[in-house]
Image (spheres, rainbow, N blue to C red):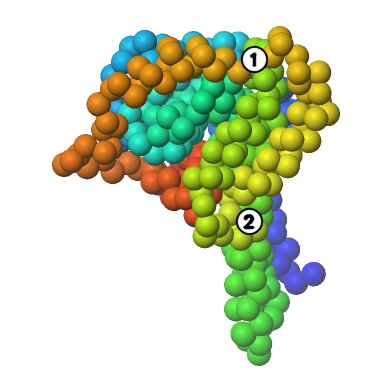
């Protein structure tokens, strides 16, 4: 192997090794490479939460509605693995018209009013919150930062190595290889994000069923997203999040197999009446979401608009991870 190539690869391994160690995640059972410790994740989420809430229009003004969401969230969090129940969980109902939900490290979960208003039962809300809890317990944000950092380092090193190996006589070879490596690295990161979404769906089904919610409601949430999305969907290969139809296939499979005993079982509920009378009706009686009020300009640090033809905007954890990764590597 070319001497320069050996040096560059050794440098890459050293850099990658300094980012973080590998741990076995109690929720997923996977060995993962995470960029932050548990304490770091808690500190990051706690410090960023106030500005995030403000940037998304603030919390809904109704204390009972906020408590409704927090109650479901806290009961779901109590069903998580290992020491995850002891995270400083907080669940915020955002006064935003967006069809969105997202999580931040350390147990901060946000659900936008625009998404909840499209729901018809409490189990759907539990499914969304459970999915976001899954991002936290699976430590997806820290993992994503580590993955992106590794891809960036690897692409830079391999690009330099190929250019050096090609030599001055074939500069076009090195340039073409650099482009190919960069594109390949991007696709690896995108696929990684899609896998995270699938894993969060899996964990959301687990947590909601542990609270005796009918896991079939998760598929109903995907139907809401699919209907809202309409036409103009981008190719799944280049999306950080799976198409709702793909997610529905996976969810249906799990409901049919792992959670078969929950179907046609009165123990596993949707809580339609409770949701309508105690949550939806009071929510609809409130003034319009702050994001809809004339003259209010809310410009968040993270991409906030729910673009129906861009699934990457449906959940902010990947965008937040990318931004945090960039800040951490500057």
| Label pair 1/2, CB-CB below 8 angstroms | no
Q: Residue furthest bottom?
A: 169
* Residue 291 visible in rendering: yes
What is the secondary structure assignment of the residue under circle 1?
loop
Left or right: residue 86 versus residue 21 is: left
Residue 188 horizontal/vertical position (percent): 66, 55
Eyeballing the image, is 282 above or below 14?
above
Q: Which mark is residue 236?
A: 2
Foreground of the two, 157 or 205: 205
Q: Residues within 10 Å of mark 2 (few under 14, many from 20)?
A: some
Q: Which mark is residue 312?
A: none
Which badge, 1 or 2, comes first in the chain's sequence?
2
Residue 108 horizontal/vertical position (percent): 47, 24
**Residue pictured at 49% horizontal, 16% vertical:** 275
Residue 110 horizontal/vertical position (percent): 44, 28
What is the secondary structure assignment of the residue under circle 2?
helix
Eyeballing the image, is 251 above or below 286?
below
Left or right: residue 155 versus residue 287 is: right
Q: Which mark is residue 269?
A: 1
Left or right: residue 118 versus residue 298 is: right
* Residue 135 visible in rendering: no
Residue 19 horizontal/vertical position (percent): 60, 41
* Number of numbered labels in the structure image: 2
The residues tagged by marks 1 and 2 sit, at their Cα atoms, a distance apart of 33 Å
Q: Residues within 10 Å of mark 1 (few under 14, many from 20)?
A: many
Q: Kindly report which numbered mark, 1 or 2, lies closer to the viewer in this rendering.
A: 1
């Amino acid at each position: 192997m070319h001497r320069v190539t050996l040096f560059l690869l050794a440098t890459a391994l050293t850099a990658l090794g300094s980012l973080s160690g590998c741990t076995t995640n109690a929720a997923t059972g996977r060995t993962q490479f995470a960029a932050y410790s548990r304490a770091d994740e808690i500190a990051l989420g706690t410090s960023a939460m106030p500005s995030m809430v403000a940037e998304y229009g603030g919390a809904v003004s109704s204390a009972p509605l906020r408590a409704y969401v927090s109650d479901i969230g806290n009961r779901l969090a109590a069903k998580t693995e290992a020491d995850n129940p002891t995270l400083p969980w907080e669940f915020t109902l955002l006064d935003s018209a967006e069809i969105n939900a997202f999580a931040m490290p350390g147990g901060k979960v946000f659900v936008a009013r625009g998404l909840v208003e499209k729901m018809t039962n409490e189990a759907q809300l539990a499914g969304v919150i459970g999915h976001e809890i899954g991002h936290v317990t699976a430590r997806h944000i820290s993992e994503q930062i580590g993955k992106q950092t590794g891809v960036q380092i690897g692409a830079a090193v391999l690009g330099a190595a190929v250019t050096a190996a090609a030599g001055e006589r074939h500069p076009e070879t090195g340039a073409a290889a650099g482009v190919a490596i960069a594109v390949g690295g991007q696709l690896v990161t995108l696929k990684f994000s899609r896998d995270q979404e699938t894993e969060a769906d899996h964990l959301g089904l687990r947590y909601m069923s542990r609270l005796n919610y009918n896991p079939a409601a998760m598929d109903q949430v995907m139907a809401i997203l699919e209907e809202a999305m309409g036409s103009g969907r981008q190719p799944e290969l280049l999306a950080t999040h799976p198409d709702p139809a793909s997610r529905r296939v996976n969810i249906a499979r799990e409901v049919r197999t792992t959670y078969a005993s929950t179907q046609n079982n009165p123990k596993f509920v949707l809580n339609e009446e409770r949701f309508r009378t105690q949550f939806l009706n009071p929510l609809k009686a409130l003034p319009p979401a702050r994001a809809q009020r004339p003259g209010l300009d809310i410009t968040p640090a993270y991409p906030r608009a729910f673009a129906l033809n861009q699934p990457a905007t449906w959940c902010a954890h990947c965008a937040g991870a990318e931004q945090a990764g960039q800040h951490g590597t500057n």
